[in-house]
Amino acid sequence: MKSQLFAQEFQEHQVHGGFGLQNERLLKVALNGEIMARQGAAVAWQGNVEFAYQGAGAKKLIKKLVTGEDLQLMKVSGQGDVFLADYAAEVHIVYLENESITLNGQNLLAFESTLQWDIKMVKGLSGMMAQGLTNVEITGTGAVALTTIGTPVILDPSTQPTFCDPAAAVAWTTSLKPAVTKTDSMMKSMIGRGSGELFSMGFNGQGFVIVQPSEGYPWSTMAQTQNSSGSGIGSLFN
């Protein structure tokens, strides 16, 4: 059998322990123990791999109820190879060395179980959180895989004040404390694609902000509908 599909670029890549990229839209994890991943993100796996729902714990559960946060995680354990993706979004790996990073919950794909995570509220963003924009702080030493819709840009808010649409802000240095403000009517007509009151996030100080060229995931509503009806492979883990 002959096909361009059998070219080297499409062959499985070897990952020698931990997280690696099979390609720009597919994360490969050489599993030997356990990791945490977004529920439904597994598209393929090889070897002895098990999936289990991971509860948030009482303290995190209260925060989820307050913020309307819908971050659902699963524990992936065993030995083998696991491939994770999120609707063909670009995948990027960040390695923390006793550090912290804050992510938009919708952009979190997976992280090593050595890391600690918690739900964080941003003052002034509660209205947006109810629409699915929540923040997760990850701390420790290990790898974090995040997704972006398109190729992101890394902005440095230490040189000048930096502002962005909350849905486009993928992640930022935890030491930065974003200021959330309502956008005036003139600005509202020119930026963002959200409905109702439009907010902007402002950053100022030492650190970085990862911004994606999109104001969120247009397929999230469709995905929630599919999961609630129990259709699709992803529903096995929801």
Image (cartoon, helix red, strand yellow):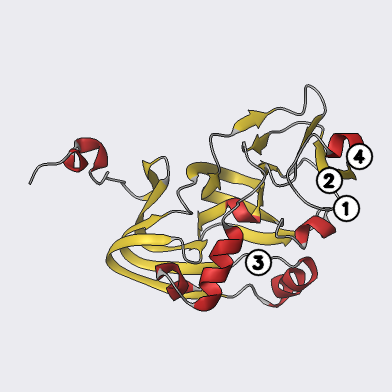
Mark sitting on residue 185: 4
Labels 3 and 2 touching (C-beta < 8 A): no
From this view, report whether residue 82 is shown above or below residue 148: below
Q: CA distance from mark 3 to mark 4?
A: 30 Å
Mark 2 secondary-structure assignment: strand
Residue at the image point whose x is 62% and y is 64% from the top: 71
Instruction: Please give the residue where the numbered disc 3 appears in the rendered image.
Output: 70
How many marks do you count on the picture?
4
Instruction: Please give the residue where the numbered disc 1 appears in the rendered image.
Output: 124
Instruction: Please give the residue where the numbered disc 2 appears in the rendered image.
Output: 199
- Displayed quadrant of residue 79: bottom left
Question: Which of disc 4 and disc 1 is earlier in sequence?
Answer: 1
The kind of residue on which mark 1 rests is: Gly
Question: Which of disc 2 and disc 3 is earlier in sequence?
Answer: 3
Q: CA distance from mark 1 to mark 2?
A: 9 Å
From this view, report whether residue 74 is shown above or below residue 123: below
Mark sitting on residue 19: none
Residue 124, given in percent of the width and then of the height, sits at 88, 52
On the question of residue 178 being in view, the answer is no
Residue 142, given in percent of the width and then of the height, sits at 51, 50
